[in-house]
């Protein structure tokens, strides 16, 4: 039942975009930060937009503003004609050019939304994207209004010795600082930080000889965990110079790490603010995956300086202009620095498990959405990851040289502007004389395209014909190879798909080849083809494209789990054994041995039965143990050597393979081995793998292991998140244990990382979460977040998005939860939008 339409939050549509009536030359801000209030004064130089589309000159201006207390306002020195609404401030009779001065009072000390200006561990920090600036002062809070900012900060020197904002420092003295950012920017890139931090400093020299000061600010006790981030930052500077020819523009680049942050990090101009978990690392506390992830996020935020900050989005519907492109850039950064093949496998696995599910659910939207109620709900896998896949297809069509030519033209044409996805595509198209008209459907259509391939071999003419059909004619690159029976690659290339039905004929083939379609996952589609069991095994063994080997193996695991009788298990296991003993790439072997996650298996069930999936998957794990126990033990011992820690692909692969062996061995009862590794581990990857194995079941080591781990790491916030998450995900963690964890002295409801480590983890513990009491528990948390932190609440409520696909009993229960939430008074826009979409008919 939906509430009365008129009281419901209303969507904003892409088609309604209009340029702003006014633009801003300069913005001068003054912050007076106190313990129990902050006074924000602004002086804004407005002028009429020459591109204003109205027929008469605009004579009013609406400024966004939420939860602000207006103290004074003046327009060219006099009191203007204005009114205050719940969403902002409307000025009447505005002249063509004027100076507006406003003073407001805000309360960062009680701001738990972690949006706008707020406090984390006693320090002040900001988060303005997408619409946080309006919680700081009245402003034109839209990305197409760019202005030069000067920021003055005033605060008690003792608790807040460090005062930071965007751009370059102008003056600094005890208790006062002024910053000037010469590059015009939209207010979503504004940042301010005030507090007590330790700093790690370094410098970078750009190709033109410019010296850039690099600074990483963290709470003093974390300073020893910053070296890796600094090295990663320098790698990012270098990579963007070498691969994209892009250099940094300001004299200083700062990163500040805070514990309370809604997402990973934010690319504010010259002053990135990061979730501590995405900065802090050393080998004792961070896993291999943590290191590579930190480097990727540091790279991502740095790369935004060109793709996002210097060229930004005209409106929020264009979000993928900066996010899809910047994700593509960070993926390439990681691929160039580490193992390209493994990076691709991980990215595709995440895309197919999570983004495909989003595309099939109630919040499905195109890469360029058509409407939103709360923009923060659209920082999605579709905008980010599918957006990056769309860029990757452009790259595949144009090749690296053509792609870089397009990027060059994009920067030449649009530097300093707020533009659209169409503008980006036109630069790619014009620089290469390539027609992307049909391709642009990728930006406007939601859902995952399905491609079917059927093949026919004609022995008389020695031709092989592939007939490819799709429901809608998507324009996409299809990468392929054909193999002869000995595993030799006969042909390879990229086919261009553009019609609903296309046939491709390959000739001069003495016998029927084994085809490998969609190598490297050249397009984000679901592919159906009639590959036989033997052909899949053949590709696992003989493909040279690691992604395809892994993909075929996943396919076989999927069949084995879903329908054990459908495949010849001994033959599959023989092939695996061949791989285990003959493949050099240890990361790849680990990937081949990793079963599809329960979540990804759910995508393949018409009706999701969480219990059945869990048990079937466990049965396959037992079958693996039965067959491979001695071999896994042998591999484990060969790899279990002590070497100095590094994250070269070789070392990462060695630990990955060793630890997946440990996973299976522990599942088979070898807990003593896990315990031995737990006690002797010298890095977190090894320690955590053993910890997980020992915590997953009730066993004689469990209590002591928990106590030992806690004792060793209780002062380390990032490791404590792992401590909570591992317990919340363990097979023996029932709801009672979760409620006990939430009473732990280190549990903190308002710190998203900690809340996620317990609650979000538990929602993925399918056999323990999916019960009436589990749902009731989650709903209570969502309702609490509705007032405390709606952005995090909206992420959690999406747990119920796929309710229609569950078994009838769970379906009814989840629906009930959604209805309870929707009936709640004063529901935030964030949660409302997700819930109403989930409940909408059909
Ligand atoms: N641009 C930010 C995300 C902002 C999210 C706002 N809810 C981080 C990033 O993508 O780099
Ligand atoms: Zn980004």
Image: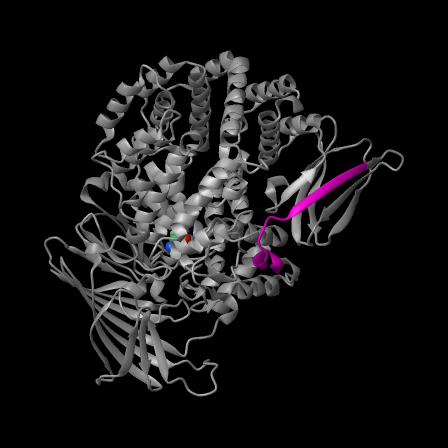
Q: Position of residue 240 (x, y in %)?
A: 44, 52
- Residue 304 visible from this viewpoint: no
The span picked out in magenta is 440-456
Q: Residue furthest right?
A: 460
Q: Nearer the viewer, residue 195 or 833?
A: 833
Q: Quadrant of residue 677?
A: top left
Q: How is the image coloured?
A: one colour
| Residue drawn at point x = 34 percent, y = 33 percent | 725
Residue in the foreground of this view, choosing between 318 and 245 = 318
175 and 803: which one is in front? 803
Residue at the image point whose x is 70% and y is 37% from the top:
529
In the image: residue 757, left or right of residue 766: left
Tell me if I can see residue 556 in this picture: yes
Q: Number of numbered discs present?
A: 0
Quadrant assignment, res 773: top left
Residue 451 lies within the magenta run: yes
When the figure is inspected, residue 199 is found, relative to residue 341, above or below; the finding is below
Rendered location of residue 837, percent (x, y):
48, 53
- Whether residue 529 sits left or right of residue 403 in the image: it is right
Residue farthest to the top, as pictured: 630
| 550 falls in the magenta region | no
Side of 574 relative to 637 (left or right): right
Whole-percent x, y for residue 595 in the image:
52, 28
Name above or below for residue 310 compared with residue 800. Answer: below
Give residue 76's position: percent from left, percent from top.
Answer: 25, 84
Asked whether, in this view, residue 341 is left or right of residue 186, the answer is right
């Amino acid at each position: 039942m939906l509430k009365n339409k008129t009281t419901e939050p209303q969507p904003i549509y892409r088609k309604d975009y209009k340029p702003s009536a006014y633009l801003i030359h300069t913005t001068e801000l003054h912050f007076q930060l106190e313990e129990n209030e902050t006074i924000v004064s602004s002086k804004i130089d407005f002028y009429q937009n020459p591109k204003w589309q109205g027929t008469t000159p605009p004579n009013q201006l609406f400024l966004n503003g939420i939860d602000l207390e207006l103290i004074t306002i003046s327009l060219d020195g006099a009191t203007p004609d204005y009114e205050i609404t719940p969403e902002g401030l409307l000025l009447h009779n505005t002249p063509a050019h004027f100076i507006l001065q406003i003073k407001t009072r805000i309360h960062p000390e009680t701001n738990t939304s972690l949006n706008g200006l707020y406090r984390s561990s006693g320090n002040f920090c900001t988060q303005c994207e997408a619409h946080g600036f309006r919680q700081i002062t009245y402003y034109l809070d839209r990305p197409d209004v760019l202005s030069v900012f000067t920021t003055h900060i005033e605060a008690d020197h003792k608790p807040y010795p460090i005062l930071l904002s965007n751009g370059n420092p102008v003056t600094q003295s005890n208790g006062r600082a002024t910053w000037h950012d010469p590059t015009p920017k939209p207010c979503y890139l504004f940042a301010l930080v005030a507090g007590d931090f330790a700093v790690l400093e370094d410098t970078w020299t750009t190709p033109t000889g410019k010296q850039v000061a690099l600074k990483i600010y963290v709470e003093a006790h974390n300073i020893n965990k910053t070296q890796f981030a600094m090295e990663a930052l320098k790698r990012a500077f270098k990579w963007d110079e070498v691969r994209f020819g892009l250099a940094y523009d300001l004299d200083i680049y700062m990163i500040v790490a805070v514990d309370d942050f809604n997402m990973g990090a934010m690319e504010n101009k010259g002053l990135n603010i990061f979730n501590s978990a995405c900065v802090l690392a050393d080998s004792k506390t961070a896993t291999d995956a943590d290191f590579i992830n930190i480097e990727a996020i540091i790279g991502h935020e740095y790369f935004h300086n060109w793709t996002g900050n210097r060229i930004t989005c005209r409106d929020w519907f264009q979000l993928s202009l900066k996010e899809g492109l910047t994700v593509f850039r960070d993926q390439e950064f990681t691929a160039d620095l580490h193992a390209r093949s493994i990076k691709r496998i991980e990215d595709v696995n995440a895309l197919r498990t999570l983004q495909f599910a989003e595309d099939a659910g109630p919040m499905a939207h195109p890469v360029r959405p058509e409407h939103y109620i709360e923009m923060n709900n659209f920082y999605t896998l579709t905008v980010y990851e599918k957006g990056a896949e769309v860029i990757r297809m452009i790259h595949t069509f144009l090749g690296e040289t053509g792609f870089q030519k397009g990027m060059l033209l994009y920067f030449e044409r649009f530097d300093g502007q707020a533009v659209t996805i169409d503008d980006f595509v036109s630069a790619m198209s014009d620089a290469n004389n390539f027609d992307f008209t049909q391709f642009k459907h990728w930006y406007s259509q939601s859902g995952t395209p399905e491609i079917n391939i059927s093949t026919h071999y004609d022995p008389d003419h020695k031709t092989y014909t592939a007939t490819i059909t799709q429901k809608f004619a998507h324009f996409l690159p299809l990468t392929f190879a054909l193999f002869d029976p000995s595993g030799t690659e006969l042909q390879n290339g990229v086919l261009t798909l553009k019609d609903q039905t296309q046939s491709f004929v390959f000739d001069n083939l003495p016998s029927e080849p084994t085809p490998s379609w969609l190598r490297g996952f050249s397009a984000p589609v679901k592919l159906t083809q009639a590959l036989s069991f033997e052909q899949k095994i053949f590709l696992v063994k003989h493909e040279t494209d690691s992604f395809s080997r892994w993909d075929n193996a996943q396919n076989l695991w999927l069949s084995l789990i879903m329908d054990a009788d459908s495949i010849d298990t001994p033959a599959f296991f023989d092939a695996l054994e061949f791989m285990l003993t003959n493949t050099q790439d240890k990361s790849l072997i680990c990937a081949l041995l990793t079963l599809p996650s329960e979540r990804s298996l759910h995508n393949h069930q018409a009706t999701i039965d969480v219990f059945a999936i869990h048990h079937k998957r466990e049965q396959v794990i037992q079958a693996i143990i039965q067959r491979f126990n001695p071999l896994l033990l042998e591999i484990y011992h060969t790899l279990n050597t002590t070497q100095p820690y590094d994250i070269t692909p070789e070392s990462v692969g060695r630990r990955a393979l060793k630890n997946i062996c440990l996973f299976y061995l522990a599942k088979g009862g070898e807990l003593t081995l896990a315990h031995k590794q737990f006690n002797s581990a010298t890095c977190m990857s090894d320690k955590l793998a053993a910890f997980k194995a020992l915590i997953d079941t009730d066993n004689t080591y469990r209590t002591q292991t928990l106590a030992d781990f806690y004792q060793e790491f209780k002062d380390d916030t990032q490791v404590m998140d792992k401590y909570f998450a591992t317990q919340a995900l363990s097979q023996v963690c029932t709801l009672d244990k979760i409620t006990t964890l939430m009473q732990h002295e280190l549990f903190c409801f308002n710190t998203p990382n900690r809340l996620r480590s317990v609650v979000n983890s538990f929602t993925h513990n399918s056999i323990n979460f999916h019960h009436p009491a589990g749902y009731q528990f989650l709903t209570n948390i969502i309702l609490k977040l509705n007032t405390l932190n709606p952005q995090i609440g909206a992420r959690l409520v999406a747990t119920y998005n796929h309710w229609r696909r569950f078994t009838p009993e769970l379906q009814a229960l989840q629906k009930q939860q959604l209805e309870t939430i929707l009936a709640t008074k004063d529901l935030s826009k964030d949660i409302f939008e997700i819930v109403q979409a989930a409940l909408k008919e059909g």
